[in-house]
Image (spheres, rainbow, N blue to C red):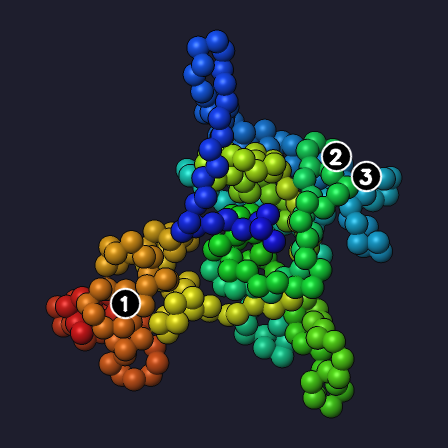
Amino acid sequence: MTKIKNSILVLLFSLIIYACGDDNTFRNPFTDVDHKALAISDNDSIVKFLKAHYYDETEDVLKSLETGKTALFEDSKLKIKEVTENDINYKLYVYVINEGSTAPNPDKGFPTVVDSVFVKYAGRTFSGTTFNANEFDSNTFGIWFNLNAVIAGWTHGMTSFKGGSLKKEPNGDPFNGPITFLNSGKGIIFIPSGLAYPSSRAQNQSSNLVDTNLFFFVDLLDFVKDTDQDNDNVPSILEDIDADGDVNNDDTDGDGLPNYFDTDDDGDGVLTKNEDANGDGDPTNDFSDPNNPTLPDYLNKNIK
């Protein structure tokens, strides 16, 4: 589990010391990494891998390409997502084995990049045409993650799947057996190193996965639609005020807490959930300032 977590607020920096030459100076070996060039070479490596392998549905495994089989790269189930991190453009490859079904709640749709997901997974490293047969991390029982608190490849890749639905008895009663999810979202996410554990982040430099391409078999069992991480009655995805896809850089009152972690977004001393003039439980549709009629009260420190 700890392999895929990306600590946001607390960074435990590992002091990596390297002796260089006879002058007893120390130099970080990652200083000269050209991450833009690495993004290009990583993509070339991933494409090479995708062209050399296919998915065996019967055994639920990846295999070297054989005559008569369709390479992953040519398979219609493969989706390519463009993701920008630190001003570098990456390609994220998501192979959708089963999109999933949220029946009997079809309106639930797909998770957002800040929703909480319940997922099983298994991760491996790969390069060129080969991959490590040993999983470096896995969970076969299901575990909850917030998608904005994991590596970027997961954050964006998991939005390609829907959750499943709990198995029930034929009469609709809860299933009299182990908790079982049906028609869950299932696939493989191929992640370039820049969306995993790039050395540009100091906390990754001591990891054995630093600057390494990864792929994960994932099984999205369930997710919380419109996750509200600070319980202020504003879904976390709506706390992305500038709509750039990153909730961590939206801090209306400048107190150091992003809005999705701040229970008083505008810092006026009134909790966000209480700035609900019409009493419908939704602070986002209350506009009381005639001088600023498009700014909701919970983001307007002049309205209390």
Disc number for residue 297: none
- Residue type at mark 1 is Asp
Q: Position of residue 158 (x, y in %)?
A: 58, 56
Q: Mark 2 and mark 3: span between their CA atoms? A: 9 Å
Q: Is residue 153 above or below residue 24?
A: below
Cβ–Cβ under 8 Å for marks 1 and 2: no
Binning the other alpha carbons within 10 Å of mark 3 as few (below 14), some (14 to 19) or many (20 upward) gives: some
Q: Is residue 33 above or below residue 6?
A: above
Going 51% across and 38% down the picture, which residue do you hit?
204
Give the side of residue 32 with respect to residue 160, left or right. left
Q: Position of residue 56 (x, y in %)?
A: 81, 50
Q: Nearer the viewer, residue 269 or 294?
A: 269
Quadrant including the C terminus = bottom left
Going 54% across and 29% down the picture, which residue do you hit?
38
* Residue annotated with mark 2: 130
SS of the residue under disc 2: strand
Q: Position of residue 127 (x, y in %)?
A: 68, 33
Going 55% across and 60% down the picture, which residue do you hit?
145
- Residue type at mark 3 is Ser
Q: Nearer the viewer, residue 75 or 28?
A: 28
Disc number for residue 264: 1
Q: Is residue 66 above or below residue 165?
A: above
Q: Nearer the viewer, residue 154 or 69?
A: 154
Binning the other alpha carbons within 10 Å of mark 1 as few (below 14), some (14 to 19) or many (20 upward) gives: many
SS of the residue under disc 1: loop
Q: Quadrant of residue 181?
A: bottom right
Single out the mark in the foreground, 1 or 3: 1
* Residue annotated with mark 3: 64
- Residue type at mark 2 is Thr
Q: Mark 1 and mark 2: span between their CA atoms? A: 50 Å
